Amino acid sequence: MSNKAIINADVKKGTINKNIYGHFAEHLGRCIYEGFWVGEDSDIPNTNGIRNDVVEALKNIKIPVLRWPGGCFADEYHWKDGIGPRENRKRMVNTHWGGVIENNHFGTHEFFMLCDMLETEPYVCGNVGSGTVQEMSEWVEYMTFNGESPMANLRQENGKEEPWALTYFGVGNENWGCGGNMRPQYYADLYNRFQTYVRNYGENKIYRIAGGPNVDDYKWTDVLMRESAQHMDGLSLHYYTIPGEFWTGKGAATNFPEDEWDATMHKAYHIQELIEKHSAIMDKYDPEKRVGLIIDEWGTWFDVEEGTNPGFLYQQNTIRDALVAGVSLNIFNDHSERVQMANIAQTINVLQSMILTDKEKMILTPTYHVFEMYKVHQDAAKVALDITSDTFKVGDKEMPQVTASASKANDGNINITLCNVDRASAADLTIDLRGMDVNQINGRVLTANEMDAHNTFENPDNVKPVKFTDFQVNGNELSINLPSKSVVALTVE
Ligand code: AHR
């Protein structure tokens, strides 16, 4: 048996929206505080309170868009608590996440400053669950109004003369759950009302994102599209890869048995079915595919690390997470005509992170390396790819052993990303690369011997990409040997 693919380098299939490589940072655990924000007086090197090491590392993966302030936190966040002199800002309890004090030192101004440093676009999520129409409307006015108005004046008093540019705005989060436990009909009405007052000021044009379904709640999608499609630009979808059960035991992030590897891969693949079924409903109301499916929370969710606050969602990150990232991104690329954005949860110290920190120390996770290897696809032209994969079969679970994406960069190079999800066996793959001359191929691979190989503060480079040479080229045919549990990136010149 062997895996086969045909790539037509000269047949373009649209553009892979760079926002598929987006991220999410919530006021949760040590993501914002300690992760991004240490404050100006910290001994940890920082610029205006934001960690330099983290900014430098994240710039290297080219984060296109960053979602903030939540998550569940968004629907209890009152933005006026987070502006003005920091010493006067309200101290509140983060009731959703760990019951800790939130001192509001990281607010609107700090978020936009972070986005500037990262050269990323902001995506702000507003409060529907416990907020008011006026509060949401004023926030947009505060951020984007250029001229004289009560909120623009307030912004100027707080030191920001010109408005910020803001495109992406979410009208609530998980309004079927932590965002208000609503029925879809009720949320659709609220959505229509709230978004009316999310104004476009001057040249600033807001891309409005409605709170979408949880996993396979197809009714939610149907009702929202029926009632509100004409008022939205995007509909969100949340899906987490959890090998076990959410309430009774999700499974450990490290030191897990083989069947949890298999269950994790199987659940990661499930996002394809979700995208296709939600898209089919969206097609009914929006055949032109104007409304984007915005997968603004995705990634692995395991049991928290022993001894850590259960409300902080801190988990290690292994080669298994790398495969989940690689497979998911290949699926998003493949559905890029509908998937206009995706935001992995979450950037630092929470769930499937890019970065883990321990005081002044910082490590990059295997997931970080996948985002770095895949950044070549951002805004690149997707090229035609047909893949026939062997089946990886374990117990009652079957899934493709190999997945792939291919895109053409501006310089004419073809970038191919490949995943072999099989924890035990290497995979042979033959690619018939048509429509270009093959002169040179450079490859990198991310793999490991152990299923739970990961980086630690003592051994930060245990899992990192290395040069990959296990392929032969014969004319336009590439014969590749993908190691077990590997992510491979090839650039064909
Ligand atoms: O990412 C963690 C939480 O998961 C988010 O706050 C919420 O939206 C989701 O349930």
Image (spheres, helix red, strand yellow):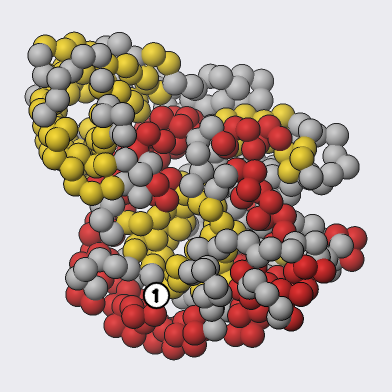
Residue 338: x and y, percent?
Answer: 28, 59
Residue 40: x and y, percent?
Answer: 84, 44
Q: How many marks?
A: 1
Q: Is 49 placed above or below 254 here?
A: below
Image quarter where the C terminus lies is top left
Relative horizontal placement of residue 320, taking residue 52 as reference (left or right):
left
Kindly tell me whether residue 186 is visible in this rendering.
Answer: no
Q: Nearer the viewer, residue 190 or 199?
A: 199
Residue drawn at point x = 25 percent, y = 52 percent: 335
Q: Nearer the viewer, residue 57 or 458?
A: 57
Residue drawn at point x = 40 percent, y = 47 percent: 18
Image quarter where the N terminus lies is top left
Residue at mark 1: C-beta within 8 A of ligand 1:
no
When asked about the image quadrant of residue 386, the answer is top left
Residue drawn at point x = 65 percent, y = 65 percent: 163
Residue 422: x and y, percent?
Answer: 28, 29
Judging by the rendered image, the residue that carries numbered circle 1 is 232
Residue drawn at point x = 45 percent, y = 68 percent: 207
**Secondary structure of the residue carrying numbered label 1:** loop
Callout 1 amino acid: Met
Residue 236: x and y, percent?
Answer: 41, 65
When asked about the image quadrant of residue 491, the answer is top left
Crowdedness of circle 1 by 10 Å Cα count: few (<14), some, many (20+)?
many
Kindly tell me whether residue 111 is visible in this rendering.
Answer: yes
Q: Nearer the viewer, residue 401 or 152?
A: 152
Q: Is 372 placed above or below 28 here?
A: above
